[in-house]
Image: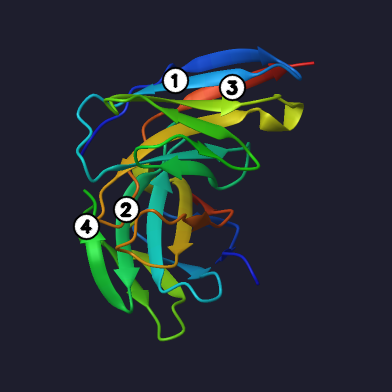
Amino acid sequence: DAKTTQPNSMESNEEEPVHLPCNHSTISGTDYIHWYRQLPSQGPEYVIHGLTSNVNNRMASLAIAEDRKSSTLILHRATLRDAAVYYCILSRGSQGNLIFGKGTKLSVKP
Amino acid sequence: ETGVTQSPTHLIKTRGQQVTLRCSSQSGHNTVSWYQQALGQGPQFIFQYYREEENGRGNFPPRFSGLQFPNYSSELNVNALELDDSALYLCASSLDRVRMNTEAFFGQGTRLTVV
C-alpha cells in the first residue's frame, strides 16, 4: 500500500491559516488523495479529496503538487474547533479501504 | 438522512470471551468497512463488506469475522478475545466500494476493553 508521511504535530493561532503538509512519493496514477480529521472522542470525519487538480470545499482547500508526490491541506482560518488529528490517506480505485498513518495532531491556540 | 450508528458505545469483556459489535450504515450506502484504532494510533483496516460479501481484508487473524445484512447493516465478531484487542472499533459506510473518489462516513465507534 502506498504510504504517506506527515509531521507528528503542528501548532496554529486561531483565525490564522494553517498549511498541513503530506508527502506521498510512491503515489500511483490511480491513487486518490484523501484527508480526514478526527476530533477527540469521535470517529474520523471526511475533509476533502482530490486526484490531480487543486480542490476547494467549505471546510478546506487541497493543493496537489504537479508531480503528485506531495499535497497540502489548507485551513483558511483556524478555529478552536479545528484542533484534531489530520490524516492524509491514499486510496486505490480497485480497493475500498483507507490506509491511515499516525496523522498530524493540530493544536490551535486562542 | 441518518448517519452511521454503532452499538454499544462501550463494552468490557474478559479475555477468552467473544464479542459482537453492530453498525447501521448511512441510508443508501452499500459498503461497510471496519477499523480498529488502538490508543494513540491511526485506524487500522480490518475488512470491508460490499453487498453482503467480504471485499478485502487487512492483516487481522480469522477470529475477527463479520457479516453484512440485506439492509447493509453489519456486525463485527471477535472470538477468543485477547488483551491487545482493547481498542476503539470504527465502522464506516460509503456509497460504493469501487469509486474511491467518494467519501466514507464513520460512526462514533465502540470502545472495547478486554480485562
Q: Earlier in the sequence, mark 1 or mark 3?
A: 1
Amino acid of disc 3: Leu
Chain where mark 1 sits: A
Label 4 – label 3 distance at C-alpha: 31 Å
| Type of the residue with mark 1 | Pro
Q: Circle 4 is placed at which residue position?
A: A94
Q: How far apart are marks 4 and 2 (CA)?
A: 10 Å
Q: Which chain is indicated by disc 2? A: A
Which residue corresponds to the image point at 51% horizontal and 70% vertical from the top-left?
Answer: B25
- Classify B106 as above or below B51: above
**Chain holding disc 3:** A
Q: How far apart are marks 3 and 2 (CA)?
A: 24 Å
**Secondary element at image label 3:** strand
Q: Which residue is labeled 2 in the image?
A: A97
Question: Looking at the picture, how far across and down is residue A73, in whole percent?
Answer: 51, 28
The residue located at (67%, 30%) in the rendering is A82
Q: Mark 1 = which residue?
A: A21
Residue A18 picture quarter: top right
Q: Mark 4 lies on which chain?
A: A
